[in-house]
Amino acid sequence: MPAFTLPTTLDAWLSLLETRHVRPIDLGLERVGQVWRRLGVSLPGVKFVVGGTNGKGSTCAMLEAILLAAGYRVGCHTSPHLIRFNERIRINGEELSDEALLPLFERVELARGDVSLSYFEFTTLVMLLAFSGQLLDALVMEIGLGGRLDAVNLVDADCAIVTSVDIDHADWLGDNREAIGLEKAHIFRAGKPAICSDPHPPKSLIRHAETIGADLWLLGRDYNYAGDRQQWSWSGRGARRSGLAYPALRGMNQLLNASGALAALQAVRPQLPVGAQDIRRGLALVDIPGRFQVMPGQPTIILDVGHNPHAAGHLVANLGNMAYHPETYAVFGMMADKDIDGVIAHLRNHVDHWICCDLPGPRGASAQMLEDCLHAAGITDLKDPKKGINRTVVCSTTPDEGLRLARRQADLNDRILVFGSFVTVAQALPAVREQLQEPPQAFHDATQEISRPH
């Protein structure tokens, strides 16, 4: 492709990549590996690769925050993004600008020749180029899907972390934990630290680590954590960290992620030593949106990007740890290829009012599809004052309109859960911002009940 025909804006590049490759998800390292070798990428620093079903983004954010608090120069890659593509690639805590990214897109395009790359493969190479040649002490990189055939697995990790193993992306990874665990275990490298934060690791993961000679760290065997209402502690392989404040990220499952991050840092301590104050400061400052994120204002709005049954189970536990709210509204949007029934099974007894939302694109489930799944699970409109039951199921066109509907109907002491997908949370943010900009009572008083959307 001649240089003058290349896209000239980041949005144009992303639009091109979304439609050019024949399959949105196309696992395998052969094609992307060819272009990787042509580019001659040379990566600096200690390389952390983080995989797992859930908890990857949070673990990456904690590693990044602690290392930055310790004064190290850090590159961090996470995916998917919530609002802007730039969120995926950070250097020293700052997102790369469009101006910095555009030449990298051009370099990948010119290097690929006639090799077709998926959106994720292409942008992974952009990320690797962004870090190549930088004066960085550490790189933290999140696996996109699985592990063995994910483009990020081009990188030989100095320390690999598998946060959790559960069933998701079954069409690509398998329909049981043993098959999925083996796929994820392929980010481990011989002779290098291999951390598993899952309390019940699949045998396939353990066997693979032992077969290749990885230095496997298992929760409960090589490291552990304990906590009370005020603080928590970590111990592992001759080290102990006491009197730690809870991570700024909410949810008890975040201790699992934090423990895995501390195990990884302990495993590479000779190369990247961090002190107790670095850990405390990093965990206090860590920030990643959409992970059981409780917004200020009334009614309480909770944003959660969880999109599989495993994440839904953690979500229910975290909801149970909140203060009492009379009623819970759920603004619910998911991708059609996810286990919608499995997610509903976890939340069915914890939501009073469901607002199903359309999500865009060929993968997005329609609101009607979600409503049908709720009905199949026995969740329908039901009002029984004698039993204290007041349940509704409605449809909305978009998550932001769904959230506006919930805000009109909820009392100030109720809570509204926005969940099911990164897309759901991202599209609800305009309505979230409205609440943050208004006095607590203003929106509720100024609106009236609206009719059920169809």
Image (cartoon, grey):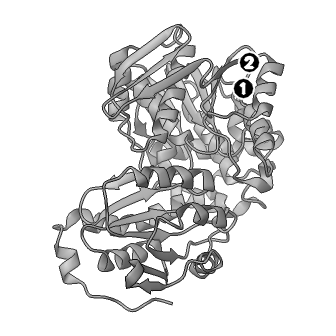
Q: Secondary structure at mark 1?
A: loop
Mark number, residue 214:
2
Q: Looking at the rendering, which quadrant does residue 55 occupy? A: top right
Q: Amino acid at mark 1?
A: Phe
Residue 53: percent from left, percent from top: 64, 45
Label ID, residue 188: 1
Nearest the eye: 364 or 165: 165
Would residue 242 be seen by someone viewing this image from the given angle? Answer: yes
Q: CA distance from mark 1 to mark 2?
A: 7 Å
Q: Is residue 206 above or below residue 414?
A: above
Q: Is residue 295 left or right of residue 345?
A: left
Q: Are marks 1 and 2 in contact (CB under 8 Å)?
A: yes
Q: Quadrant of the N terminus?
A: bottom right
From the top left corner, tell me how far across and down residue 436 is, in percent.
24, 62
Which residue type carries mark 2? Answer: Ala
Height in image: 413 above or below 308? below
Q: Residue furthest front?
A: 386
Q: Residues within 10 Å of mark 2 (few under 14, many from 20)?
A: many
Q: Quadrant of residue 337?
A: bottom right
Q: In the picture, residue 7 is in which quadrant?
A: bottom right
- Residue 20 image point, x, y percent: 72, 61
As rendered, which of 194 and 252 lies closer to the eye? 252
Residue at 79% in and 52% down? 175
Q: Is residue 70 in view? A: no
